[in-house]
Amino acid sequence: MTTILRLIRFAFFFACCYAVNAGAVELATRSAARNRLAVDGLKAHAAVLSDDTFEGREAGKRGGRAAAGYIIDKLKSYGLHGAGPEGGFLQPFDRERNNVLAQLPGTDPELREEIIVVGAHYDHVGYGNARNSYGPYGYIHNGADDNASGVAGVLEAARVLAELKAPLKRTVVFAFWDGEEAGLFGSKHWTTHPTAHLHNVKCFINLDMIGRLRNDFVEVFGTRSAEGLRKLVTDANRDEQLVLDYKWELRDDSDHAPFFHKNIPVVMLHTGKHADYHRPSDDLEKLNFEGIQRVSRLTMDLVFNLADAEKLPEFRQLSKQEAVSEAARKAMDRPFAAPPSRLGISWREEADESKGILISSVQYNSPANKAGLRIGERITKWNDAPITSDESFQKFVLLATGTVRLEVADRAGATREASLELRGEPIRVGVSWAEDDAEPASVIVKRVVAQSPADRAGVLVADRICEVDGAPFASAAEFEERLGTMEDELALTVDRNGILLKFKLKLNE
């Protein structure tokens, strides 16, 4: 073997080992990050920020300035550097308000200029008034959920990522906005006076009110602002298994809005409003800290997905129309109408299974009608096979090809044979689907045929199929092509409310 050939083989071997090792390091880093994002830290941050001494953290007041000081002290203790003007942590703006900004530099020479911003507003409404509170006024509004919960989540994620020295390819900026309650002033100021090139910002993740998780339910806004963004969020939810309600509507009611209007993809996580919203009763003891932990872990996994992706999707302009209109969503959610019956009858299962099924209606001009089948008759055999149950009969109807021979018994029990050909093609899978240009690497299930392999496996209307036999596909056309190659079994991975489920379909049973 020549020396050059040995060098080539060694280089190839080293590259393979490096790739495997890099993947193992990434998984180990994610696992360590999840384990280190703990309830105790979240509780400590929320307890301080929602304490009476901060007087409701009103923007521009002493309580708000004290909250900013607390956040800066924590960020410095994590070893993070400022991302504000001249490398500081503060970005001052009108009336003594301040954004707090820190960063974790990216490690990839080509991608580190690109930025993922993770943020939460730290201000609240102080003592409350008729413009910003549901009362009673004049009492400290501690804002434990709104938004000490979101700040705690961002702080803990920043701590864990900084301590792990996580080798993220892109830069991550941690942003704590002031003046949100008065009109999104902090995030508006940053997007009009950015401390980094705005065109480098590839996504903004907004945590606003994540402290009241109930029934595992989280509202997710903004994923239609870039192609494939929902898939990245769902993938980040693999471990937490939260029930994600993906919203199309996107109001100008939180700090995602200024980014969205600057054509930057956004994701906002929110556990829902409640009776204590903008009232003095939004206090620490009502927070679900395990819930905050789960949402924060999902956020951190999403940061990994975004920061380490080979390429991130661009802003999707059509999302601006979808954000203010429910018409497109309603059309997308509407299931397909049932297809014409292949046989053209309705039936009832007989109490005595040996007697087959009883015809209760016959559709005009259907195969059954043309073959002379009548109401009150019983179908007892299908191609010489006895009909033993409603389920077996439905399978016969779905899979039939060519001419079918039926044994039919009249009311008196006399039997005869009927031959017919069913409408349409055999139904091997049993799903109809539609494309969604916001998520081209998935299809939306619009119809599931009763007793089909898909129905028996548990696939439902509105599921999003994203993998076939464990492998993703790039388009609906590729999905259809791959279905055509399946013979006996088919494995589907679906996104159902942000949870990935796997189903095995038996195609010939």
Image: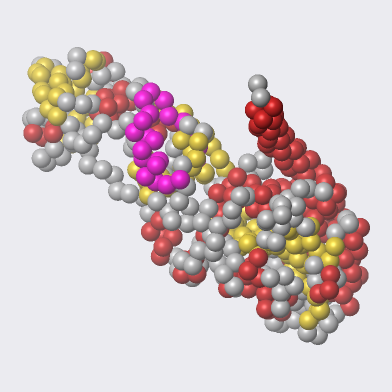
What residue is at 75 percent from the left and 81 percent from the top? Answer: 129
Q: Position of residue 225 (x, y in %)?
A: 54, 62
Corner quadrant of residue 86? bottom right
Report if residue 452 is visible in the image.
Answer: no
Q: Is residue 39 magenta?
A: no
What residue is at 18 percent from the left and 35 percent from the top? Answer: 423
Report if residue 327 is visible in the image.
Answer: yes
Q: Which residues are magenta?
A: 474-494
Foreground residue among 89 and 312 = 312
Q: Is residue 475 magenta?
A: yes
Left or right: 404 as drawn, with respect to 240: left
Q: Position of residue 274 (x, y in %)?
A: 67, 62
What residue is at 72 percent from the left and 63 percent from the top? Answer: 119
Number of numbered discs overlaid on the protein picture: 0
Foreground residue among 68 and 404 = 68
What residue is at 89 percent from the left and 72 percent from the top? Answer: 66
Left or right: 403 as drawn, with respect to 158: left
Q: Quadrant of the N terminus?
A: top right
Q: Position of residue 277 (x, y in %)?
A: 70, 67
